Amino acid sequence: MFKIAMVPDWPRNSDGDVLRSMAKRGFDFSLPHEIDFNIDFQAWPPPAEAIQLLRSKCRDVEIYDEHQYVQLRINAHVTYEFVIRTQADLSEQMKAFGGVCESWGVFYMPFKPEA
């Protein structure tokens, strides 16, 4: 029988809401996952120096010209603290280049209990 874990008391903000939604759908927080962090820039394309800096910090960096954002994929445990800290760190590093990280996501298949 599947046991539903208690949902932690994350802050009442958009990041906490996402984590609560993930928990209710059976997301396994005990395992590391690929977490996508999206960086938006005031001007497109972003400066080459910004991309070089991101690539020096993370191997998995994709530039999405069509939607005009840069995405970093980091393998880690999904925690509120990690998500908030990483967004703040990326925003601080990209500030001089007109960039900000305000969104993230994880691709996963929600748990579906058997009927």
Image (spheres, grey):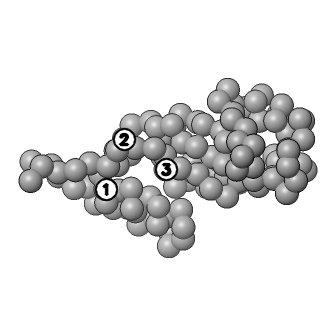
Distance between mark 2 and mark 1 Cα atoms: 14 Å
- Residue found 73% across the figure and 38% down from its top: 63
Residue 49 visible from this viewpoint: yes
Q: Position of residue 40 (x, y in %)?
A: 75, 53
Q: Give the labeled residue for mark 2.
A: 30
* For marks 2 and 3 on the same chain, the one whose residue lies earlier in the sequence: 2
Q: Give the labeled residue for mark 1.
A: 25
- Residue found 90% across the figure and 36% down from its top: 49
Crowding at dot 2, Cα within 10 Å, few <14 / some 14-19 / many 20+, comes out as few
Left/right of residue 6 with respect to residue 44 in the rendered view: left
Q: Position of residue 52 (x, y in %)?
A: 83, 31
Crowding at dot 3, Cα within 10 Å, few <14 / some 14-19 / many 20+, comes out as some
Above or below, 59 relative to 73 = above
Q: Give the labeled residue for mark 3.
A: 79
Q: Which mark is residue 95?
A: none
- Residue found 70% across the figure and 50% down from its top: 67
**Viewer-proximal residue, 78 or 52?**
52
User: Helix or strand or loop: what does disc 3 sit on?
Assistant: loop
Q: Position of residue 12 (x, y in %)?
A: 50, 73
Q: Amino acid at mark 2?
A: Ser
